[in-house]
Image (tube, rainbow, N blue to C red):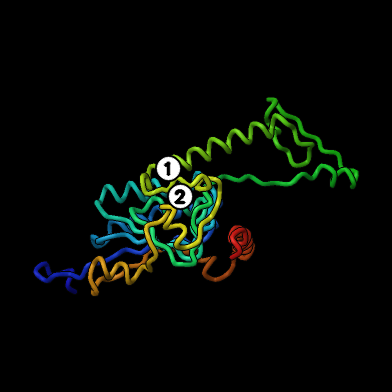
Amino acid sequence: MKRFISFLKSEPTVAVVRLQGAITNAGRGLDDVSLAPVLEKAFKSGKPKAVALQINCPGGSPVQSSLIAARIRRLSEEHSVPVYAFVEDVAASGGYWLACAADEIYVDSCSLTGSIGVISAGFGLQDLIANYGIERRVYTAGTSKSMLDPFREEKEEDVKRLKGWLNDLHESFIGYVKSRRGSKLSDNPELFTGEVFLGQKGVDEGLVDGIAHMVPEMKKRFGKKVQFRRYGQKKGLLSRFAMALTHDALGAIEDRAAFARFGL
C-alpha cells in the first residue's frame, strides 16, 4: 500500500534473480532469450536498490554466457542499479562469466569458482560403425563442411582449426574477466588455466570479493527492513503438468553431467 502513497516512505527493495543450471542454446537451461524478460523486470520494476544474482552454474555455451552477462551490464548501467552476485555450489567457466557481470561477487566458504578455460569434447565412432559393416557416405561442396565428423577418422588440420577457435575463445574469456576484475586479480599463473578455487582461495586470488550470504549482506548494506523481490523464468503449461518429459530429462542429464565435473 505504501508504494501508492507518495508521502509515505517505502522500504528499500532488492530484486533477486536465480541463475541455476547449465548455460545452453537449446532452451532447456539458461539462455539470453529466456532470461531477457526476467532481467528486464528485475531492473525496472519498483526501483530496486540493487539486483542480486543467486548463481549455481557449472558453465556452458560461451556465446550465451557473453550475451547474458552483456545484458546484465547494460541494464545495470541504464538504470544505475548495482549488481551483486552470490555463488552457491559453483560458478565455474560460463557460470563465472555470469558472476563477473556483477559489481561484486560473494561466495560460501565451500563454493567453487573459476575454471577460466574452454573445452570441446566429442566421440570418435568410426571403428564402431565399421564393426557393424556400416559405410559412412558424406557428400559436400566445400572442403571443410565435414570437419570433425565423429564417424570418420580425425584429421590433423581439423584439430588444429578447432584448437585455434578454442584459444580465441579462451582469450576472449580472459579479457572479459580482466576487464571486470581488474587489479583485484592476483598474478597466480594458474588463474587462467581452467583451475577452480574453493571459498577463501577464490577471495585470495581476487576472483571474488568475499565470503557472504545474500540476505545478511543485503541487510547490512540496505537496512534490516530491506524487501526481496524474486524474479524467475516462467515455465510453460506443458512443463508445469509434466508433459514434456523427454525435454526435461535431456536437460536434467546435461545439468547432471556439467555439475559432476566439479564433484557436485
Quadrant of the image occupied by residue 135: top right
Residue 69, image x and y in percent? 41, 49
Nearest the eye: 138 or 237: 138
Task: Tell me which amino acid carries mark 2.
Answer: Trp
In the drawing, what numbered circle is on residue 176? 1
Res 233 visible: no
Label 2 packing within 10 angstroms: few (<14), some (14-19), many (20+): many
Residue for point 32% across, 63% down = 15
Residue for point 50% across, 44% down = 63
Tell me the element at label 1.
helix
Quadrant of the image occupied by residue 16: bottom left
Q: Looking at the image, is 93 positioned above or below residue 4?
A: above
Label 1 packing within 10 angstroms: few (<14), some (14-19), many (20+): some
| Quadrant containing the N terminus in the rendered view | bottom left
**Inter-mark Cα distance, 2 to 1:** 8 Å
Task: Tell me which amino acid carries mark 1.
Answer: Tyr
Residue for point 63% across, 44% down = 120
Residue indicated by mark 2: 97
| Quadrant containing the C terminus in the rendered view | bottom right
Q: Looking at the image, is 45 positioned above or below residue 94?
A: below
